[in-house]
Amino acid sequence: MPASPRKVVILDRDGVINVDSDGFIKSPDEWVALPGSLEAIARLNQAGYRVVVATNQSGIGRGLFDMSALNAMHEKMHRLAATVGGRIDAVFFCPHTANDQCDCRKPKPGMLRMITERFEVEAQHTPVVGDALRDLQAAAALGCPPHLVLSGKGRQTQAAGELPPGTQIHDDLRAFALDFLAEEHE
């Protein structure tokens, strides 16, 4: 059954789908899926959700890697998701550094706004899953339900506090998918 164009889940990439690194993920070899994350994407797809990635990639703006490396990382992500029956409908990314003062870099909501407009979904029905406060702040700024996963930087984010009101917390992307889909059927 094809996914409804009105059901979208927005995921951060590093720390949510794949292992994160303070030194940036700079190549396909460094891109390693977190256990259960790709299966969680497949589960969301099977429930009729389109999955879209929204990721800050300031490593491009910093000159740590180029567009061909980013494209190769995303090709690997798409390929591995497909091997378990998952599909990522689009990847939106911000290549800018914080100094660029752009509107697309999270915690600003520009990238999420572009996604909701492109997929013609209402923000209040479009969950955003991230491991960093900036992911949750961008979601809250647009009116999307914020979901924190404790993978990646999630435990530090939770410990630091100041989560936007209504933030739901999950162990990882697999737990988010199970919790979210169970809640949907209540």
Image (tube, rainbow, N blue to C red):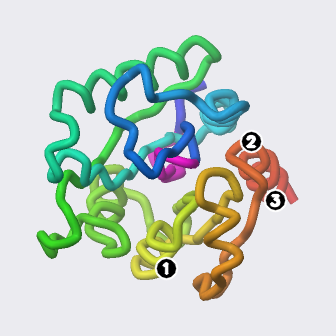
Residue 25 in percent (x, y) is at: 39, 38
Q: Residue furthest front?
A: 23
The residue range painted magenta reads 4-15
Which label is found at residue 60? none
Looking at the rendered structure, the secondary structure element under dot 1 is helix
Q: Are marks 1 and 2 in contact (CB under 8 Å)?
A: no
Residue 2 in percent (x, y) is at: 53, 28
What is the distance, in whole Å, between disc 1 and disc 3 at their CAs?
20 Å
Residue depicted at x 15% and y 72%: 99
Judged by depth in the image, the label closer to the viewer, 1 or 3, is: 1
Precedes in sequence: disc 1 or disc 3? 1
Q: Which residue is labeled 2 in the image? A: 174
> Can you say whether 132 is above or below 83 in the image?
below
Disc 1 marks which amino acid?
A: Ala
Disc 3 marks which amino acid?
A: Glu
Quarter placement of the N terminus: top right
Residue depicted at x 25% and y 54%: 58
Residue 36, image quadrant:
top right
What is the distance, in whole Å, between disc 3 and disc 2 at their CAs?
14 Å
Q: Which residue is labeled 3 in the image? A: 183
